[in-house]
Amino acid sequence: MPTVFEWEKPLVELEEKINELRNFIFEQGIDFKDELNDLERKADKLRKEIYERLTPWQRVRMARHPDRPTTLDYIKLVFDDFFELHGDRRFGDDHAIVGGIAVLDGEPVTVIGPQKGRDTKENITRNFGLPHPEGYRKALRLMQQAERFHRPIITLIDVVGAYPGIEAEQRGQGLVIAECIEQMSFLKVPIVCIITGEGGSGGALAIGVGDRILMMEHAWYSVISPEMCATILWKDANRASEAAELLKLTSTDLLKFGIIDDVITEPLGGAHRDHEGTGRQLKAFLRRHLSEIKRIPPDELVKHRLERFRKIGEYQAKKLNEMQVDM
Amino acid sequence: MLHVFRNKPKYATVRPEKANQDGVENGGSAGKGNDPQWTRCDNCSSLIYNKELHKNNYVCHHCGFYFRMSAVQRLQQLADENTFQPFEPLVSCNPLDFPGYPAKITQCQNATQLDDAILIGEAKIEGYGCVLGIIDFGFIGGSMGSVVGEQITRGFEYGIAKQLPVVIVSGGGGGARMQEGIFSLMQMAKTAQAVGRFKKAGLFYLSVLTHPTMGGIYASFASLGDIILAEPKALIGFAGPRIVAETTRQKLPPDFQTAEYALKHGMIDGIVIRSEMKATISKLLSYHL
């Protein structure tokens, strides 16, 4: 049974009714065309009503839909070939982050992204898409390799956060995230980062420093998950929907803030309803943005990248009369 | 080594009256008992005369417990007298219109006498010029929002412009300033890049971690030091210990995420006791002239 959100139920019921009627027409050969058209018009209207007015929390839930395309799905949908590379050459191979060389329009590119599982078994192998330090070290290794061979880097980000585990801490989770952010900032190749699902804090930013930062329509990106935010504010994770409103974490908000460059529109109803359509859409956006930044000389690229992040921050100089006398 | 004796240090304190009155916040509770002149140690419960506590760098005489120091107290301990020149003061906006955030800022400003969770400027440490930045836990847990991110970045840029080393004393609970959402997260990138540019300029960055250095601060500028020191028993890590325990449902090692644990696992260069911190910093600065 596919996951159906409570707000989709009226639509799903209507869609089922349409299907039944269609079958009935097919089997009985009776002409109910007018009725069918009527119902389909109703469904279209309802679809628009539901999906164009999603709350931030509903969009977070869409970003987590179990049938949403994963990183490996996108790789299959968007690229012509993919050769996966493994291991950080230091400790191990983290299955929660995949990476390798893919081909886009005949040209090799390096693609990296956290990987969630489809079922329980795969989720255990993938550690529910929560990377360990070796995952980020693998990502960094592949990015540095890409620079050596002048390959553009594409990161597909869908991660609720870096794994909060004993061994992860032992092996320097915080340190490796900092290293990734620093090193990625100075790489002399074009970098496109796409938040495809969840953009959870430092674990997302570690592979999120790029020349173009794009977001799928129903992805979220913030410093903290709505559940954690609600826990801190009200000691109640069940109030995550309220926290989602406060955090301004949707693609719409982030575009307005100038944090991201573009929003990749999803098929009506979300990426999970149409993988092929979503893949085509992502590919079109990726192509356009990549072709634009590929024209920029490497040194300029890094300079612009640094300037982009340098500007981010909302503060003001303190008025003089407020200053303390003894400082 | 002549340079070691150059720039004779001048001694005195910055705003001593303020620090003595306020005592210590959070990590201990100096001056919070019935008598404002005395402080009860959180660890061994013995009473300590505040002036003694101040003289002893806010370490308990009886059990060696480290009280949390405010940024001003830390500045007094580390910087030579009358050498600190603060940067232009910046104050936070409320980019997400987060409810209650401006009130919280005002409340923390009044409590700490700081503009935000950082005190930063040019200073001398035993005569050695440097940029000195200190995170104050008393200001929304020492979290990094736009102001902290901007000031840290300006610190490294100032260091590049004046060819000065940078010393940052970190100590922030959650690391990120939740109320600034994505803007807080982006400060991690901004500050890490500032460190990167600073290192490319061939300059020396010393990161000092105090209790607690976690989350977004640890996962950005704090762990990118050329040399990383920590105070004994300081909590250092990415995810909070409670989150780790809840997620893994495992019993945490007794020394988990302490400075000692970080040292054992190769994440920091050394642990320095508070009374030796200033001398250690000045020595390391002298190696990087």
Image: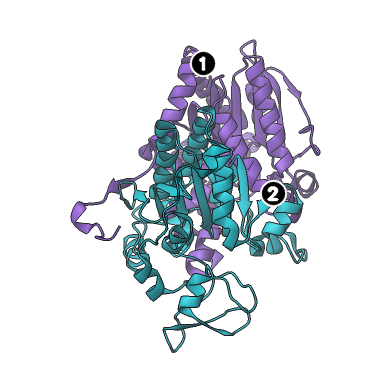
Chain colours: A purple, B cyan
Pointer 1: residues within 10 angstroms few (<14), some, or many (20+)? some
Q: Nearer the viewer, residue B273 or A144?
A: B273
Q: Position of residue A52 (x, y in %)?
A: 42, 43
Q: Label 1, secondary structure: give it.
A: helix
Determine the residue positioned at 51% across, 59% down.
A229
Badge 1 or badge 2: first in the primary sequence? 2
Determine the residue positioned at 42% across, 35% down.
B157
Quadrant of residue A98 within the rendered picture = top right
Quadrant of residue A282 within the rendered picture = top right
Q: Nearer the viewer, residue B68 or A102?
A: B68
**Residue B236 as seen in the image, left or right of residue A14:** right
Residue B76 visible within the image: yes
Determine the residue positioned at 62% across, 51% down.
B229
Q: Quadrant of the C terminus of chain A?
A: bottom left
Pointer 2: residues within 10 angstroms few (<14), some, or many (20+)? few
Work out whether B180 lies above or below A230.
above
Mark 1 — on which chain does it sit?
A: A
The residue indicated by pointer 2 is A1
- Label disc, if present, on residue A232 of the rendered structure: none
Q: Label 2, secondary structure: give it.
A: loop
Mark 2 — on which chain does it sit?
A: A
Determine the residue positioned at 45% across, 48% down.
B8
The residue indicated by pointer 1 is A298
Q: Which residue reaches farthest left? A: A321
Q: Nearer the viewer, residue A236 or B84?
A: B84
Q: Nearer the viewer, residue A315 or A128?
A: A315
Residue A109 visible within the image: no
Q: Position of residue A294 (x, y in %)?
A: 51, 14
Q: Which residue reaches farthest bottom? A: B34
| Three-letter residue code for mark 1 | Pro
